[in-house]
Image: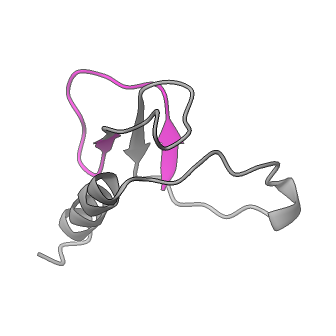
Amino acid sequence: MAITSQTKMFLEIGECLIKKWKEAGLLKPSAIKPAISTIEQKLVLKKLGVLSTEDLASLNNTLKELLFLG
């Protein structure tokens, strides 16, 4: 999943807002988008933060809906 600060009023299928973005260590209000990719570990410069329990639950529910896992 990808995190973006390009948020809009209406979320699309598979997207969810990060409500506690400051607590997560993000610089701006952000959303999670359904873009799955891989990168080499050496390209990761630093860890920005950690999602709250509430935001992890939201992501989990969004993934279930996206993957039709009910």
Q: Residue at x 30, y 45 (%)?
A: 15
Q: Is residue 42 above or below residue 4?
A: below
Hey, which residue is sitting farthest left in the picture?
Answer: 70
Q: Residue at x 24, y 35 (%)?
A: 11
Hey, which residue is sitting farthest bottom in the picture?
Answer: 69
Give the quadrant of residue 10.
top left
| Drawn side of residue 54 relative to residue 48, left or right | left
Numbered disc total: 0
Visual colour scheme: one colour
Q: Is residue 23 above or below residue 39?
A: above
**x, y (%) of residue 7?**
37, 25
**x, y (%) of residue 44?**
79, 54
Depth check: 41 or 69 in front?
41
Query: Does the segment drawn in magenta span residue 10?
Result: yes
| Drawn side of residue 35 relative to residue 58, left or right | right
Q: Quadrant of the C terminus?
A: bottom left
**x, y (%) of residue 30?**
43, 32
| Drawn side of residue 59 relative to residue 25, left or right | left
Q: Residue at x 74, y 61 (%)?
A: 39
Hey, which residue is sitting farthest right in the picture?
Answer: 42
Depth check: 60 or 34 in front?
60
Query: Does the segment drawn in magenta span residue 15?
Result: yes
- Magenta range: 1-17
**x, y (%) of residue 48?**
64, 45
Give the quadrant of residue 37.
bottom right
Q: Residue at x 81, y 64 (%)?
A: 40
Dominant SS of magenta comes to loop
